[in-house]
Amino acid sequence: PVAAPPVGACYSYQQQPPQPQQPQQPYVDYTGSGYDQAPHAGPGAVPPQQPYYGYQYQQPYYQQPYQSMVSSKDHVAAGLLAIFLGQLGIHKFYLGYNTAGFIMLAVTIIGSIFTFGLAAGVMWVIAIIEGILYLTKSQSEFEQTYVINKREWF
């Protein structure tokens, strides 16, 4: 539908009334492997089903979950190692805390020589407490606290 010229507008025989602009159709490239495929729009063309508002939507980037990035350690295994072999620091070695494991091992062996076994008893009590803490946490809490945040003691 063509709009009527405004009232009082005079046009000479050389002037044409303004024509409404037709929307430009996008350039369609039919050089693909066949005409049965969806046509490929040329450069700068906007597909008719997606209105262009001055920005383009981009899919947000998601990182891999922590569980696949960090090696998973089982809280039950760590708890049982702490209860049964904890005075030697085996549960610390299992969790990757080598320094803490060597400290527990050295205090148990060398400290027991000088304290007649009292140091081994203290390390055993500490290991029992840590084992109970490991077993009472859920797997996700355990991983968050001891695997991701690297909390070495209690």
Image (spheres, grey):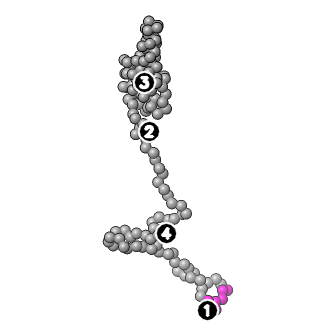
The residue at which mark 3 appears reads as: 92
Q: Which mark is residue 40?
A: none
Marks 3 and 1, how far apart in space? 94 Å
Are there few (<14), some (14-19), or many (20+) residues within 10 Å of tag 4? few
Magenta highlight range: 8-15
Marks 2, 3: nearer the viewer: 3
The residue at which mark 2 appears reads as: 66
Marks 2 and 3, how far apart in space? 21 Å
Residue 27 position, x and y percent, is 45, 74
Element carrying mark 3: helix
Q: Which of pointers 4 and 3 lies earlier in the amino acid sequence?
A: 4
Report if the CB atoms under discs 2 and 4 are less than 8 Å apart: no
User: 125 above or below 10?
Assistant: above
Residue in the image at 42% along x and 36% along y: 70
Residue 11 colored in magenta in the image: yes
25 or 63: nearer the viewer: 63
Marks 3, 1: nearer the viewer: 3
